[in-house]
Image (cartoon, grey):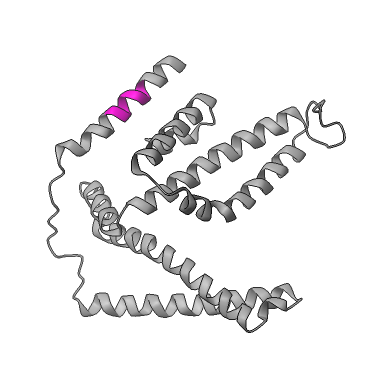
């Protein structure tokens, strides 16, 4: 439901998503230091995106910035785009931080179980492994970067060599770990044709979804 509100770049929806995100962070007592650490690289990407949007959109010049080629339409478009992208990233960080891979697997399996011609167990397993391996790849990237820095590889002037010193070891370690996981699943007898039993969904877990649905329908009624 939140993803559906982020598709449409409306100020009311973005404001609602921002308030909801702040309330969730406060309710979960989410550490701000962890959030800033995860967003430091994405912040550079959002800044570059904002500059491209602001400089590449024609329109009325900004009166208080006459020496820069910014336009009012470009600033509005860049601000809305970065606002929406920032919310998507923050919700993704929050989701991956509070959701266990097993919960994600069971949730997707339960959701896709009635859908024919789709293996809910396989999709749930792949999603949970993606969630788990994403943090592992980030850890491997830090280790490779520190090892490369210790060997003074970061002083190479050729950017292709610098990328090669980081990407190739990272890919090699990722492929090795994926192969080990494949053998581990085979050794434990993973099969998709075995009967699957999932725990029942507690009714109290549906209460937040019902409240969120009522809020979204109310806002949609006010906007229309």
User: In this orientation, does residue 117 appear?
Assistant: no
Quadrant for residue 167, please give it: bottom right
Q: In x, y percent, where is residue 72?
A: 74, 28
Q: In x, y percent, where is residue 172?
A: 49, 80
Residue, x 45% and y 75% (percent of image)? 174
**Residue 177 lies in magenta, yes or no?**
no
Viewer-closest of 13 and 111:
13
Question: Is 22 placed above or below 148 here?
Answer: above
Q: Is residue 96 left or right of residue 90?
A: left
* Figure label count: 0
Q: Residue furthest right?
A: 67
Q: Is residue 29 left or right of residue 78?
A: left
Residues shaded magenta: 211-217
Q: In x, y percent, where is residue 127?
A: 34, 58
Residue, x 29% and y 62% (percent of image)? 125
Question: Is 118 placed above or below 137 here?
Answer: above
Viewer-closest of 39 and 86:
39
Question: Is 159 placed above or below 11 here?
Answer: below
Q: In x, y percent, where is residue 22?
A: 44, 36
Q: Residue furthest bottom?
A: 151
Q: Quadrant of the N terminus?
A: top left
Residue, x 38% and y 59% (percent of image)? 131
User: In this orientation, does residue 36 appear?
Assistant: yes
Q: Is residue 177 left or right of residue 61?
A: left
Report the magenta stretch's main SS: helix
Q: Is residue 6 left or right of residue 191?
A: right
Question: Is 198 placed above or below 218 here?
Answer: below
Quadrant for residue 76, please give it: top right
């Amino acid at each position: 439901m939140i993803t559906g509100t982020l598709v449409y770049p409306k100020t009311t929806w973005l404001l609602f998503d921002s308030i909801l995100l702040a309330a969730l962070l406060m309710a979960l007592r989410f550490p701000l230091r962890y959030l800033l650490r995860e967003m430091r690289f994405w912040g550079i990407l959002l800044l570059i995106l904002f500059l491209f949007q602001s400089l590449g959109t024609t329109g009325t010049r900004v009166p208080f910035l006459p020496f820069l080629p910014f336009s009012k339409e470009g600033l509005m478009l860049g601000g809305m785009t970065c606002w929406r992208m920032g919310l998507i990233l923050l919700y993704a960080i929050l989701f991956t931080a509070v959701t266990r891979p097993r919960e994600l697997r069971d949730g997707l399996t339960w959701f896709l179980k009635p859908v024919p011609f789709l293996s809910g167990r396989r999709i749930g397993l792949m999603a949970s492994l993606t969630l788990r391996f994403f943090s592992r790849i980030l850890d491997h990237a830090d280790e490779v970067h520190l090892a490369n820095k210790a060997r003074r590889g970061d002083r190479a002037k050729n950017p292709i060599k610098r990328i090669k010193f980081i990407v190739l070891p990272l890919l090699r370690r990722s492929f090795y770990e994926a192969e080990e996981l494949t053998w581990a699943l085979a050794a434990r007898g993973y099969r998709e044709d075995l009967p699957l039993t999932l725990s029942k969904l507690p009714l109290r877990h549906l209460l937040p979804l019902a409240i969120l649905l009522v809020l979204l329908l109310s806002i949609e009624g006010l906007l229309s």
